[in-house]
Amino acid sequence: MNSYRPRFAIAGTGSGVGKTTLTIGIMRALGRKGLKVQGFKCGPDYIDPTYHSAVTGRASRNLDTWMVPHETMQEIFIRGSDSADVSVIEGVMGLYDGKNPLSNEGSTAHIAALLDCPIILVVNVQSMARSAAAVVMGFQKLDEGARIAGVIVNKCGSEGHYRIVKSAIEQECGIPVVGWLGRNEELDIPERHLGLIPAIERGELNPLFELAAQQVEATVDLDRILSFANDAPALALPVERLLASQRDSGPTIAVARDASFNFYYLENLEMLEHCGAKVIYFSPLAGETVPSDADGVYFGGGFPEEFAAKLADNIRLKDDLFTLAARGMPIYAECGGYMYLCRSIKDRSGQTYPMAGIIPAIVEMQPKLAALGYREVRAIQDSLLLPEDSRMRGHEFHYSTLTADNSDTYPYAYETTGLRGVKKEGYCSGNILAGYTHVHFASNPDAASRWVGICHEYRKKKRGIANGTGTARPETEA
């Protein structure tokens, strides 16, 4: 694997300046040139990578410098960009926005610095002229080590407006302005609600992607941007730590994956495989149940409340899960999967739907965000992923609240630390682990190995060969 990776980051002065529109337009336009494009997204985001994957035909990956060690982030980038002609990294919020308001930690600027990556800064210049230069200059001066190679201006009123702001920025900042977009409502990205992902996967946004590419081809200097990308130096190959194989063969882990459960870090699944697990998929929405050869089940995040009626109708899956849980099958769930394992979900209209009933709690959707932000979790007790008192990192994002049937005896999984302090979160009882936090296995690689090992022990028990003794259970034999 060589370490030369043509690359550039698309950053913004803030959220809503048009980063995603330009990113997908540039990705599609580069693809139309015959280039293999690899997408990345800074920070813990599941929706924008779905755009990237649809546009490029390659699975987009998240880059984060708070959830995972710096060397691991670099490894994710180098592995993910292998065989691509160019990598395009979409930033998060503004260029310098991250975990800490007093430093670049976790920001697009931090990631770009660790990857020695040129930055294209996107600026909304609506109702601006010379002031646009002051905005760009401020971003230059805040961290003079940031490699802002070029600027793209968005929301221009006309080509004449573009030339005014271009001349001001280039004179005062010494940075080339390499393109512009006008005020075209047809280019606006739909609101990033959770139900958008199925629309992307069905191809319903392809006309938008094509329109964005056509506009980019008309008004953005792609050759200049590619020259920035090609000038990026080779990267030092990090010591392999993320995907080091630990077992030649192992258990089968069934992953719920469809429109209701689709929030997974690709690295989480890959790490399970490189610990020896065989990862297979099933669709609760399609009426499927846990595959017969499964030795563990993984329910990721998503939005089960949007499909609560169909999930409630899949009685076979709920019955099978209840039986498998009682037999000791390791079951792990996070956020939307956590909600599904509870007794019921009440949607925003007030309708209540019965769910799997494995966790003694009920869920109710709220009109506003109930939780958002990075989380560090500390295991309160031994679990599928962590021994007691060990830690992992991730993030939390949900509109629901959960109420335990009996909070006095409710076995919490984690103590979480975030901006609002410390609280208890999740559910942990025997072979069941669930929580609202979307954890990143790369923040503690032992977690993937531990879970695969527990599934492996369940597999041996299921087949009646634990410790070389016992008899097989016909009803659970794969």
Image (cartoon, rainbow, N blue to C red):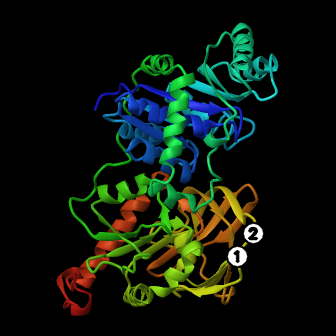
Asked if residue 238 lies left or right of residue 114, the reply is left
C-alpha separation, residue under disc 1 versus residue under disc 2: 7 Å
Residue at 43% from the left image edge and 47% from the top image edge? 53
Query: How busy is the neighbourhood of tag 2: few (under 14 within 10 Å), some, or many (20 plus)?
Result: few
Quadrant assignment, res 415: bottom right
State the mark number for residue 367.
Answer: 2
Residue 152 position within the rendered picture, expressed as x and y whole percent measured from the top left:
63, 24
For the question of whether residue 91 can be seen, the reply is: no
Q: SS of the residue at dot 2?
A: loop
* Total numbered labels placed on residues in the image: 2
Q: Position of residue 321 (x, y in %)?
A: 42, 85
Q: Give coordinates of residue 257: x percent, y percent.
A: 42, 67
The answer to whether 123 appears left or right of 231 in the picture is right
Q: Which residue is mark 1?
A: 348
Tell me if residue 287 comes above or below residue 172 in the rendering. Answer: below
Question: Is disc 1 in contact with disc 2, using a CB cutoff of under 8 Å?
Answer: yes
Residue furthest to the top: 171
Q: Nearer the viewer, residue 439 or 263?
A: 263
Label 1, secondary structure: give it. Answer: loop
| Residue 265 against residue 112 in the figure, above or below | below
What kind of residue is marked 2? Pro
- In the rendered structure, which amino acid carries the disc numbered 1? Arg
Q: Residue at x 36, y 74 (%)?
A: 296
Is disc 1 surrounded by few (<14), some (14 to 19) or many (20+) residues within 10 Å? some
Q: In this picture, is 446 found above or below 354?
A: above
Where is the C terminus found, in terms of image quarters?
A: bottom left
Q: Residue at x 53, y 65 (%)?
A: 301
Question: Depth check: 191 or 325 in front?
Answer: 191
